[in-house]
Amino acid sequence: MTRPFERISSRVLVDNPWHRYCHDRYARRDGSPGDYYYVDMAGSSVVVPLLDNGEVVILEVERYLLGTKLWEFPIGGLEPGDDPLDVAQKELAEESGYRANRWDALGVFAPYKGVSNEHCHVFLARELIRGEQALELSESIDVHVVSLDEARRRILGNTVGDGTVGRSLLGDGQSIAAFAYLDRFLAR
Amino acid sequence: MTRPFERISSRVLVDNPWHRYCHDRYARRDGSPGDYYYVDMAGSSVVVPLLDNGEVVILEVERYLLGTKLWEFPIGGLEPGDDPLDVAQKELAEESGYRANRWDALGVFAPYKGVSNEHCHVFLARELIRGEQALELSESIDVHVVSLDEARRRILGNTVGDGTVGRSLLGDGQSIAAFAYLDRFLAR
């Protein structure tokens, strides 16, 4: 008999350039079979770009799925076999234009544990040098430099009635998590 | 011509009891068509259960997709038309056994902006009364009561070599985000 929460069978339903959508059969707590539909992703890398003066680079990103812009740290998906640090360096350069000479790994989290097996790798980028963005046609991204406090405020999203106009009410979960790992790192 | 980041067409590829998996055609930055594959979810509610003595209730949850246990706050998915607070109250009771007399809405975030349109609603639950869990066969959840500092440490995941044995290295992004909204609320 299959042990609880072990796989019985797995099938890829949709394969596309970004991820695979799969249907597994698995053993539930009592050993009886259950269905699991999920996104299979090699992972992602998110970067906190910290300037020498203590300010931070954040992005204002058009998000098709949400129909709004979000305040975010640079992030990009891994393909199978990719090294998380390589992807972090590539995405920082392409999305923000900045390159960094100093990198630290801050932690790893599951952004969407119920529906995706993705592991998101958090990096701190320091000793930054400014350059040019290289965006894809699927991307619309504006680069901003703000204080840490202001970045936290924007990334959490605004609350109704706080007087800010034209900004997203929605926070960005992955950037909020990256901020928490930055806090842990800076407190050491 | 369709405006950038507006939908051209949409098709449900897989419909299951938990979400829909869809394929859209949309206008990219220059108006040319692009493909978007994503999870369509009505949303979710996550609850920070805070006891009168300042301790917090956290869950040790078996996660099939990740092959490990995660430290989490109670969370549950919405179905179309559900009220986020109703789902928060139901999930707190079922997953932790606790009921709460006092509820506050702390914020809303997108947990997985690139692949899901889900909005995750964060609630603070206070004036708690302990009762019995009511788990589904798909769930294996242990309930723990710890200090806020200890909860933060566990939810962020452990780093290699920190001396902890048998605990997940992985943080839980949604619970980390919920913690950030709690911090914002408590700092007011």
Image (cartoon, coloured by chain):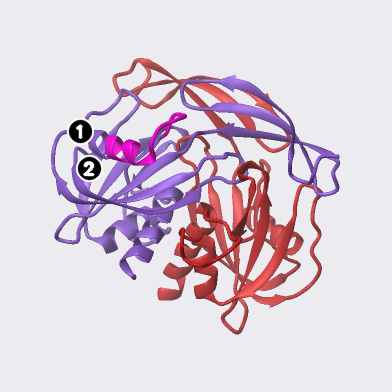
Chain colours: A red, B purple
Image coordinates for residue B176, horizontal then vertical, percent: 41, 55
Q: Secondary structure at mark 1?
A: loop
Q: Give the amino acid type for the residue marked by disc 1 in the picture.
A: Gln
Question: Magenta segment range?
Answer: B78-91
Determine if marks 1 and 2 fall on one subunit.
yes
Residue at 36% x, 62% y is: B162
Q: How many marks?
A: 2
The residue at which mark 1 appears reads as B133
Image location of residue B80, percent across then percent down: 47, 29
- Residue pictured at 20% horizontal, 45% vertical: B100
Alpha carbon distance from label 1 to label 2: 9 Å
- Please state the chain letter of the residue tagged with numbered disc 2 in the rendered image: B
Numbered disc in front, either 1 or 2:
1
Q: Amino acid at mark 2?
A: Val
Q: Is residue B39 visible?
A: yes
Please say if B66 is above or below A59: above
